Image (tube, rainbow, N blue to C red):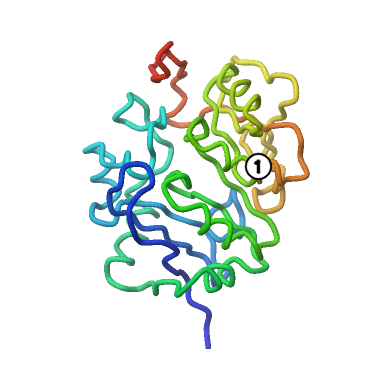
Amino acid sequence: MSKPSGVILYRGPSLLDGAPIIAIATGLDGSHRNRKTGAMVQTWIMRDDVAPHVALKTGQDASVCGDCAHRPANGGSCYVRVFQAPLVVWKAAQRGVYAQAADLGAIRNAGRGRVVRVGSYGDPAAVPSSVWEALISGASAHTGYTHQWRASPALASFLMASADSPEEAREAQAMGFRTFRVRAASEPVQAREFVCPASKEAGAKTTCAACRACGGTASKAKASPVIIAHGATARRFTLTRNGAAQAA
């Protein structure tokens, strides 16, 4: 009997704004097409009632992305092409292709022995942490990132704080997070940072599945990775005094 390609991890209210969301794990059968990440279980966090590309345009993506500076509603341009993999996965879920995990034990089995990417699209902070803790508890390794680190310090043990400036990185690190910082090409790498080895600027020396440095404080790595903003996200963002992001 072949292993299912995916499973619904969570279907319920977003912890960010209470709207209906769905979290799905795919790649359970070992299939993958992402050359940067390699063979990982991918997880997708989306509005359950609105297609991801529509949510992006209307601002309803706040339910799964929170206050991320790269949301179009915040003047940014997210690197994830939501009309591709996220939309395919969302449509499959709406057709009933994926079964709902019966309990936390079933979620644990979904990640057992695999490298898991927590939040391939969407912020993991939108989903109860017990779901992610179960998924990665039997995994061989995991990666994960959150822009909601200010409101979710407990996630530092298994998620990286997504930082968009050196100032943000220092703030997050002071709260106990390791960070994954997006930088401009002209911006230097800071102390206790290293260039992401799976990035284009590092020559794609490895994959995320092999590197495994982005697992929060649980990772063996102590320094924090940085990556040059790519594609449409290459516009530099800084923080205003009130914490909102604006294009520099």
Q: Give the residue at mark 1.
A: 216
Q: Residue at x 74, y 32 (%)?
A: 223
How many marks can you see? 1
Mark 1 nearby-residue class (10 Å; few <14, some 14–19, many ≥20): many
Which corner quadrant of the image does residue 227 belong to?
A: top right
Q: Residue at x 55, y 69 (%)?
A: 110
In this orientation, which residue lies closer to the viewer: 18 or 47?
18
* Image height of 188 relative to 156, above or below: above
In this orientation, which residue lies closer to the viewer: 179 or 31?
179
Q: Residue at x 41, y 47 (%)?
A: 126
In this orientation, which residue lies closer to the viewer: 72 or 9?
9
Report the side of 245 relative to 169 (left or right).
Answer: left
Residue 1 lies, in percent from the top left, at 53, 88
Report the side of 169 relative to 42 (left or right).
Answer: right
* Image height of 121 relative to 175, above or below: below
Q: Residue furthest bottom?
A: 1
Report the side of 167 relative to 53 (left or right).
Answer: right
Report the side of 125 relative to 192 (left or right).
Answer: left
Q: Secondary structure at mark 1?
A: helix
* Image height of 42 relative to 242, above or below: below
In this orientation, which residue lies closer to the viewer: 39 or 237?
237
Quadrant location of the C terminus in the rendered image: top left
Q: Residue at x 39, y 74 (%)?
A: 99
Residue 190 lies, in percent from the top left, at 70, 19
Q: Amino acid at mark 1?
A: Gly
Residue 2 lies, in percent from the top left, at 52, 83
Which corner quadrant of the image does residue 59 belong to?
A: top left
